[in-house]
Amino acid sequence: MITVTGTLVWYYHICPRETWLIAHQIVADQDDSNVEYGRFLQEHVYEREKKELTIGHLKVDVMKSREGQLIIGEVKKSSASQESARMQLLFYLYELKQMGIEAEGELLFPEERRKQRVVLDEAGIREVEILKEKVVDIVSKQLPPPPMKIKWCRNCAYRELCWA
């Protein structure tokens, strides 16, 4: 049984091959500057909120309460991959709803000093259900999809694996 995670959802929108590699525990270059910067952001921004909480198979970046409403946040270094971030957050909201937990979401872009509200609605539920099927389909294959040059390749910690 394949467990779909927020990380797999995020990377599916970036690169399906990367999704497969992550799901099969093929670890990216941990010394890559983008990986290091992501760790730095995780540790040093939004210090007042509860951070990196694990709820079942979910790892939520930030959690807080506002006027009695649970808010979960996903921190990204920029809005360049905003659609991937939105789908990851919708996935978290969907999974929480399946657990009986109602929440709203916020995409947080600290470098841009902005945030974007994300609410799970019927259209979002359908998007997540279709996306989960696509992720399961990719990761259940014997081999990864072939590499394809996309705009994210030059900053990817897996670039050597695809293009060496």
Image (cartoon, rainbow, N blue to C red):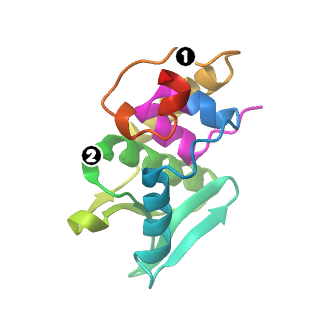
Can you say whether 109 is above or below 91 in the image?
Answer: below
Q: Which residue is at a point 36% across and 54% down the rendered structure image? A: 119
Residue in the picture at 42% in, 33% down = 13
In this rendering, is residue 51 above or below 33?
below
Does residue 72 show up? no
The percent position of residue 68, horizontal first and vertical second, equals 44, 80
Q: In the rendered view, would you say 40 is above or below 8?
A: below
As drawn, the residue found furthest toward the front would be 164
Which quarter of the image is occupied by the N terminus?
A: top right
Q: Which residue is mark 2?
A: 80
Give whichever of discs 2 and 1 has the lower sequence position.
Answer: 2
Q: Amino acid at mark 1?
A: Pro
Q: Is residue 3 magenta?
A: yes
Query: Could you say where residue 129 lies in the image, as x and y percent from the top left?
Result: 52, 33
Residue occupied by mark 1 = 145
Whole-number angstrom distance, CA of label 2 to CA of label 1:
24 Å
Query: Which span of residues is magenta-colored?
Result: 1-18
**In the image shown, does 71 or 25 lie closer to the viewer?**
25
Indicate the amino acid at tag 2.
Ala
